[in-house]
Amino acid sequence: MLITAVESSVVSLPFSMGGPHPGSAGQPWDRLEILLIRVETEDGLVGWGEAFGHAATAATKAALDSIVAPLVVGRDAGDIEALTRRVLHGVHLLGRNGPFVYAFSGIEIALWDLLGKRTGQPLHRLLGGGVPGPLDAYASLLSYGGDLGLVARNTAEARAQGYRHVKLHELTRDAVLAAQAAAPDAAVMLDVNCAWTPPVARGMAAGLAQDGLLWLEEPVWPPEDAAGLASLRRYGIPLSAGENTAGLFGFRALMEAGAIDIAQPSVTKIGGIGEMRRVITLGQAHGVEVVPHSPYFGPGFIATLHLAAALIERPLIEVLWLEMEANPFDPWVRARDGKLAVPAGPGLGCDPDPGILARYTRAPPTRTGAAKT
Ligand SMILES: [Mg+2]
């Protein structure tokens, strides 16, 4: 079945986050954005995907509309692996990690949604999974810029809402201790977003070694410094990374260097569901667990649920700790009592609510391909 059109649009959701809104990559960050992708086939079936996202939204959308969507229109929607090779080879000179690969990731997710709808199977079943129970979620707190009062208050609130795992985006041991004191029976993780050179990171890891962190995430700058990351393993804190890693071969380099205990591929960045599946398999061969990166709120998040349910032995799903007034993919994008349900319908199992979508979509979609009939 041929792809006849690709549409992209930006859904912009107001949110509150338990503290002042920080910037993101130099931009004010006061809206959650879903870069939503809609793929149509010649029989009128529609699949939904999501590409990364956040401060990259405008750049990814431009990459999608100008280069990536024209490469897929007219191609067979069911030949996902071949299309992946064709498109990623077609754009490799433009970057192996960044807007072009993010854009394709969103299309690839939509192709799996289409495949599931066409065959009447939910995505987790297509990936070889059975009937999934609810998945454990972790509360991924946003950065409060070192405000220990906000760290403590939001950690306690997340625990009270049923989360047993809380991740901080802070830079100090004091923040870890504040979170642990606020929720003594919760597991705490620390994500520093590549803040430190290896020598600084080693000093910080030595200080944190006895604190019982479930993991320390992206401690080293730059993220591709596998040897620098591996030099922290001696402190005994499980190390995680991968949201900035380029594809299967990027993960192979990290794993072969013995740099990580936990791999964190991101389905809206890495190339989509097929590349996620390959990274999960690679992790199995290296004794590395996979805890996906999923700070988003649309089809990419839903795809992560299906992938984790089908392929990961101990699923733990990242949920950004914030409050949206509404989301077109409700209720599937919200945890209840620290758990997430997995949709059982065909494909991703949840098309967007048209009314909510219309209310929060910024501008008419950009369409590539045949005119709408
Ligand atoms: Mg992170």
Image: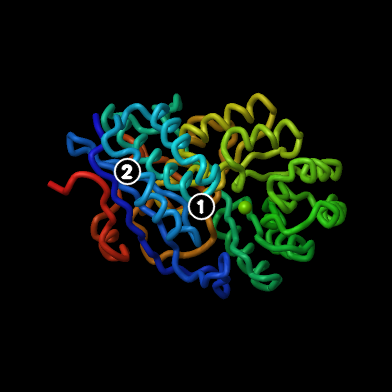
Q: Is residue 111 left or right of residue 45?
A: right
The numbered dot on residue 78 is none
Residue 70 in which image quadrant: top left
Q: Secondary structure at mark 2?
A: helix
Seen as rendered, the residue at the extreme left is 373
Q: Is residue 237 left or right of residue 315?
A: right
Circle 2: is it few (<14), some (14-19), or many (20+) Cα within 10 Å?
some
Count up the numbered dots.
2
Q: Is residue 46 left or right of residue 50?
A: left
Between residue 373 and residue 361, name the one nearer to us: 373
Residue at 49 percent across and 42 percent down: it is: 267
Q: What residue is pinned by disc 1?
A: 337
Seen as rendered, the residue at the extreme front is 93
Residue 333 position in % (x across, y down): 42, 52
Between residue 73 and residue 201, name the one nearer to us: 73
Residue 147 shows in the view: yes
Residue 294 position in % (x across, y down): 52, 49
Q: What residue is pinned by disc 2?
A: 70
Residue 38 position in % (x across, y down): 30, 47
Query: Mark 2: which amino acid?
Result: Pro
Q: Secondary structure at mark 1?
A: loop
Residue 140 in which image quadrant: bottom right
Closer to the observer: label 1 or label 2?
2
Residue 229 position in % (x across, y down): 77, 45
Residue at 19 percent across and 35 percent down: it is: 42
Circle 1: is it few (<14), some (14-19), or many (20+) Cα within 10 Å?
some
Which comes sooner in the sequence, label 1 or label 2? 2
Which corner quadrant holds the N terminus?
top left
Query: Mark 1: which amino acid?
Result: Asp
